[in-house]
Image (spheres, grey):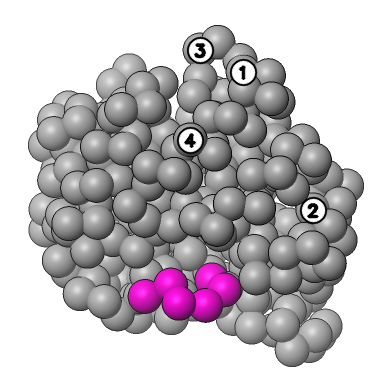
Amino acid sequence: MIDKKLKGIIPPMITPLLGKDELDVEGLKRLVEHMLAGGVHGLFVLGTTGEAPSLSYHLRYELVERVCKQVAGRVPVLVGVTDTSFTESIRLAEQSKAYGADAVVSAPPYYYAPSQQELIEYYEDMADHMPLPLFLYNMPSHVKVSFEPETVRRIAHHPNVIGLKDSSGNMIYFHTLIQMMKTEHPDFSLLIGPEELTAEAVLAGADGGVNGGANLFPRLYTDLYEAAVRRDMDTVLTLQQQVMFISNTIYKIGRYGSSYLKGLKCACSLMGICSDFMASPYHRFRKEERLKVQQVLEHLNVKIVNP
């Protein structure tokens, strides 16, 4: 489906689980339809919000197959293939293509931090072998290395590399990419990860956002994106306040780096969308935290289905 520049809100989908190696199949179906009904422009499975590194390969393959079958071409499906093994990344990409996925997304291999030259060589090699278009994924907080702008420029020359998702939160870096790519690679998609920065990024020339909150409230984020594209600043400012309220409440319950994801999954559970089971070693919110999330949703006039 990606026959032109990818734009819009492409949620990084949570992975609904019933156990350590079992998908919440019915919850997954509801989640996909919930986001599509909210007007999202694509779906990104097996990203950071999808807990991809914590899932078995068997589960990753099952998830991709089920999502692609259900979406059935209604929007593009992007699959995260980040791995410490080049071979496993290619294998998942090949199977994703067979299932009907439209593109793959790859952050640098983690554990040993590669140099910039090694990143260039790695992704040129990967792009040569990828059966689908490739998005770079800049996630320095998780993989210990960032794609420097010159590195992105070099890799973007490869015809099979079609965009980049940036989750660094560094807007100076992102503005640099926008300025550079607008001139040299105008068909290269630039997507922002942190939803708190999506409106600002789109107003500056970004192509969209990969926003976790769109699992919960997809219409809020698609409306925000469309308002930013129209440069309707009154609407942008109103919707931005809602985005920041979610960020400063649901995502801040708990004490650890996983609080964002626990809050997101807990809210989905309370709304009756899917289970909030977390992949090991993490645990779902317990009663006290769950009640706090419920109170936030009630403040937002959201119907609680599963208290």
- The CA span between labels 4 and 2 is 22 Å
Q: Which mark is residue 111?
A: 3
Q: Please report the bounds of the magenta region as a residue range.
A: 1-6
Residue sitting at 28 percent across and 21 percent down? 280
Amino acid type of the residue that numbered disc 4 sits on in the rendered structure: Asp
Q: Is residue 301 left or right of residue 66?
A: right
Seen from the viewer's position, the closer of residues 293 and 208 is 208
> Badges 2 and 1: C-beta atoms under 8 Å apart?
no
Viewer-nearest residue: 102 or 30: 102
- Coordinates of residue 263 in the picture (x, y in percent): 45, 43
Whether pointer 3 and pointer 4 mark residues with C-beta atoms closer than 8 Å, the reply is no
| Front: mark 3 or 4 | 4
Q: Is residue 218 magenta?
A: no
Is the Cβ of the residue at disc 3 closer than 8 Å to that at disc 2?
A: no
Q: Which residue is mark 4?
A: 125
Is 162 left, or right, of 34 in this rendering? right
As helix, strand or loop, the secondary structure at mark 1 comes to loop
Q: Is residue 274 visible?
A: no
* Image quadrant containing the N terminus: bottom left
Q: Secondary structure at mark 2?
A: helix
Instruction: Say which quarter of the image contains residue 243.
Output: bottom right
Residue at 54% across / 71% down in the picture? 6
Q: CA distance from mark 1 to mark 4?
A: 15 Å
